[in-house]
Image (cartoon, grey):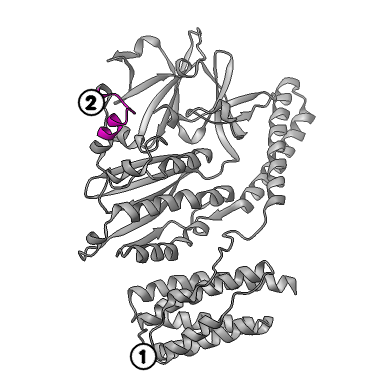
Amino acid sequence: MENYTELFLSEVETYIKQLDDHVIELERDPKMKPAIFEVFRVFHTIKGMAQTMGYEDLARLSHRIEDLLIPAKDKGEIDMSIVEFLFHAIDYLRSTLQALSSNSEIPDSLTIFEAIERLEKGEKVDLLTMNLQITKTSEIRIRMEKLDKLLNLSNELLVARLRLERLCMEIKDQRLIDFRDTATKLIESMQDEVMRLRMLPLSNVFEFFPRWFRDEAKKQGKAVTLEISGGDIEVDRSIIEALKEPLMHLVRNSLDHGFSKEDTEAGERNTVRITAAQEKDWINISVIDNGKGIDWEKIRDLAVERDLISSADSRTLDRESAYNILLRPDFSTREEVSEISGRGIGLDIVNNAISRLGGRLYIFSELDKGSQFSIELPVSIAIIRAMIFRLDRQRFAIPLSFVQETFNLKEDTVKTVHHRELYKLRDEILPMTRLGNIIDYHSNSKKKTVIVVQYLQKKRGFIIDEIIDETDIVTKKVDLLLARNYYSGCAIYSDGLPMMIIDPRGFE
């Protein structure tokens, strides 16, 4: 019976998410007949399932909600007081589901039944007095500890495979090479299967927001709609689990501070959009609003006032650098953000959370036109394809997803303009960075190689000593004491020695 209970809970949770979507549609258009029929159908289905499982109270409640919906079903239009009640009824179902899942006491349903009776009589119902204790259900119900262990073991096998390849290069025995080829195919197949099991669609996060956003907007009295796209893109489940809170911060910021109550009453279409797109091994999730936007000049002036930057520096501060000030923890206070349309609350927390996932947060805005907060994340944070290079006898790795091309460099072809080194690469001017000067690995090698990297439509040339290898690496988190913006993690090379992973975005 326990297996049937888990199946019942899982299916009802799916139906509850459907109910949220359909009732939100009815709140926007009470004459949407397909949505009325779907709500009726879902409650009818839940009733039958609950009767089969012996949950009589839940079956009786679903049956009474069916009765309440019959006039709307026949008429093709639903009363807004019933729509408001349905949101509370869904919350009660969600709370009941959590109680059944944890074997705890089911919430009292008396107030729900009383509300149904009064609504059937055409009486007004004070839904705030229903006082339901709603607890959140887990967004991801499956326990993944064993899968995590399996992933760790497959990662260790990858390191062992790399060491085997190195051994084959040294010994050059055909029998060993044949064994390496067979082991490589098996290990790669197992890694692919484990990673496929760990991948989940972003809809696991996104499906939380329509109902939550609806409640938040209603609470603030703002007529703002939420649009979502890209939920079918799959990412590593460790990213799914960590993404909800920072994304909620960004969506709440857009609703709270991108729109005023007065502006939303003007009849214009006010929207917040959550979008997701994938490019190679990276995903970009953006929260976009068409609200007030951010006054970057006020940010600049406030930063000077708070002694965060000097007056001299403020005169050369550009828009992008001003937005980056919002990510500083010493800038995020109530007084400050009230002067710049509220932006800043929690943005340092969001930025830190995204950085821990190996990602970056970018801010774009135009005053009186809206704002965009974009999160760039790797699809998987466990295994990546990387280019291995050397600086002063020290090895480093850089994700291959950033690399555009490489070439050998002649020093006399590099030009210096206003203290910046530039190189003419075909028809474009390429900014150059001597990587060793920044990360304190200076080299006297006369032979130089350039790795051309691209990110956020920017290109840069990294001057290094030489390229060693191109291979898969297992990423590990960096100790906080070693953390730098230009390090995204570390890895073990085929000889068993560690190396740091370079993140080009950290050099901005």
Taking 35 as reference, is 157 above or below it?
above
Q: Is residue 248 left or right of residue 412?
A: right
- Please name whichever residue, 367 or 475, is drawn nearer the observer in this view of the structure: 367
Q: Quadrant of residue 263?
A: bottom left
Find disc 2 in the rendering and name its residue. Answer: 315
Q: Quadrant of residue 323?
A: top left
**Amino acid marked by disc 1:** Lys
Three-letter residue code for mark 2:
Arg
Is 306 contained in the magenta span?
yes
Residue 75 numbered tag: 1
Secondary element at tag 1 = helix
Question: Measured from the top left, where is residue 40 in percent x and y?
Answer: 48, 83
What residue is at 68 percent from the left and 44 percent from the top? 151
**Is 263 left or right of 422, judged from the image as shown?**
left
Question: Dot 2: within a 10 Å radius of its alpha carbon, few (fewer than 14), some, or many (20 or more) residues?
Answer: few
Q: Percent position (x, y) of residue 97?
A: 60, 71
